[in-house]
Amino acid sequence: MVTETTKDGVTWYVCEKCGMMFDDPEDARQHEANCDAEDPTYLQ
Protein backbone atom coordinates (compact mmCIF):
# COMPACT_ATOMS: atom_id res chain seq x y z
CA MET A 1 0.00 0.00 0.00
CA VAL A 2 1.29 3.46 -0.89
CA THR A 3 1.29 6.01 1.93
CA GLU A 4 1.11 9.78 1.62
CA THR A 5 3.45 12.15 3.42
CA THR A 6 4.25 15.85 3.26
CA LYS A 7 7.82 17.11 3.24
CA ASP A 8 8.85 20.74 2.73
CA GLY A 9 5.27 21.60 1.75
CA VAL A 10 5.19 18.96 -1.02
CA THR A 11 3.05 15.82 -0.93
CA TRP A 12 5.00 12.62 -1.58
CA TYR A 13 3.77 9.07 -2.08
CA VAL A 14 5.89 6.43 -0.38
CA CYS A 15 6.29 2.75 -1.23
CA GLU A 16 5.76 0.91 2.06
CA LYS A 17 7.94 -1.97 0.90
CA CYS A 18 11.18 -0.07 0.26
CA GLY A 19 10.49 3.55 1.27
CA MET A 20 11.10 5.07 -2.17
CA MET A 21 9.27 8.40 -2.60
CA PHE A 22 7.33 9.61 -5.66
CA ASP A 23 5.59 12.88 -6.48
CA ASP A 24 2.94 11.09 -8.57
CA PRO A 25 0.62 8.62 -6.80
CA GLU A 26 0.21 6.50 -9.94
CA ASP A 27 3.99 6.18 -10.32
CA ALA A 28 4.17 5.06 -6.69
CA ARG A 29 1.44 2.44 -7.19
CA GLN A 30 3.12 1.08 -10.33
CA HIS A 31 6.48 0.89 -8.56
CA GLU A 32 5.02 -0.84 -5.52
CA ALA A 33 3.30 -3.46 -7.71
CA ASN A 34 6.76 -4.47 -8.99
CA CYS A 35 8.84 -3.74 -5.88
CA ASP A 36 10.97 -6.57 -4.53
CA ALA A 37 11.30 -4.78 -1.15
CA GLU A 38 15.10 -4.70 -1.38
CA ASP A 39 17.19 -1.55 -1.16
CA PRO A 40 16.85 0.53 -4.34
CA THR A 41 19.65 -0.11 -6.81
CA TYR A 42 20.56 3.59 -7.00
CA LEU A 43 21.91 3.34 -3.43
CA GLN A 44 24.44 0.67 -4.33
Image: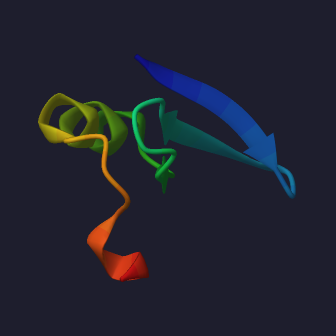
Where on the picture, by quarter, is residue 3? top right
Q: Nearer the viewer, residue 40 or 15?
A: 40
In the drawing, does residue 29 fall left or right of residue 4? left
User: For the point 27% across and 34% down, which residue is it?
Assistant: 32
Q: Residue at x 30, y 41 (%)?
A: 37
Q: Position of residue 25 (x, y in %)?
A: 41, 35
Residue occupying the far left of the picture: 34
Quadrant position of the N terminus in the picture: top left
From the top left corner, tell me how far across and down residue 15 is, in percent.
43, 36
Q: How many marks?
A: 0
**32 or 44: nearer the viewer:** 44
- Give x and y (percent) for residue 8: 86, 58
Quarter of the C terminus within the rendering: bottom left
Of 21 and 23, nearer the camera is 21
Residue at image point 19% right, 41% down: 36
Where does the image place residue 22, in percent across and percent down from the top left? 46, 51
Name the outermost residue toward the top.
1
In this rendering, the answer to whether 33 lies above or below 1 is below
Q: What residue is at 23 percent from the left and 43 percent from the top? A: 31
Residue 2 is drawn in which quadrant? Answer: top left
Relative to 17, residue 43 above or below: below
Left/right of residue 25 with respect to residue 41 in the rendered view: right
State which quadrant residue 30 falls in: top left
Q: Describe residue 35's horizontal placement relative to residue 4 as left or right.
A: left
